[in-house]
Image: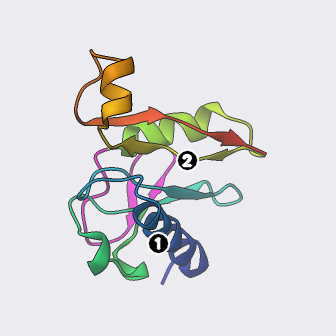
Amino acid sequence: MLLKELRTAVLEANLELVKRGLVLYTFGNASGIDRDQGLIVIKPSGVDYDELVPEFMVVTDLHGKIIDGKLKPSSDLDTHTLLYRATAPSLVLRPCTLKPSPAATSTRPAWPSSTTSNRITLTH
């Protein structure tokens, strides 16, 4: 299996998003990149988190072309590839979907109830 360790790490990152309550249903995901090979691993679209296994993760190039995987990549793939192409190799990207909450809706009344990739945390 291509990029087995990265697929496992991306799976674990996605499960951590669920554990921390940062995603809702199948919305929101984490991805990972192998800069040396120029390949991204991302969660497949519409797959329940409790059904995920490393083999389900989709491998694409930096422009979204599927290199390995039988499932459709996340609908957020274009955002992930754009961010990876535009950022320094030393940064880690963590796009996610924010669940609607009374605090979010009261502070931002125009906030859509389901917004993907509306928060990006950049860390070294």
Residue type beneath disc 1: Leu
Residue type beneath disc 2: Arg
Residue 96: in magenta span: no
Q: Are marks 1 and 2 in contact (CB under 8 Å)?
A: no
Q: Quadrant of residue 45?
A: bottom left
On screen, residue 43 versus residue 38, left or right, reads left
Under circle 1, the secondary element is helix
Mark 1 surroundings within 10 Å by alpha-carbon count, few (fewer than 14), some (14 through 19), many (20 or more)? many
Residue topped by disc 1: 11
The image position of residue 43, as x and y in percent, is 37, 62
Residue topped by disc 2: 94
Can residue 105 be seen? yes
Quadrant showing the C terminus: top right
**Main SS, magenta residues:** loop
Mark 2 surroundings within 10 Å by alpha-carbon count, few (fewer than 14), some (14 through 19), many (20 or more)? some
Q: Cα distance, mark 1 to mark 2?
A: 13 Å
Which numbered circle lies on residue 21?
none
Can residue 63 be seen? no
Dot placed on the residue nearer the N-terminal end, 1 or 2: 1
At a point 32% along the width and 21% down the height, the residue shown is 106
At a point 29% along the width and 38% down the height, the residue shown is 100
Count of marks, rendered view: 2
Q: Quadrant of residue 17?
A: bottom left
- 107, above or below 23, in the image: above
Q: Nearer the viewer, residue 52 or 67?
A: 52
Magenta stretch?
60-75
Residue 61: in magenta span: yes
The image position of residue 85, as x and y in percent, is 59, 36
Colour scheme of the picture = rainbow
- 86, above or below 84, in the image: above
Under circle 2, the secondary element is loop
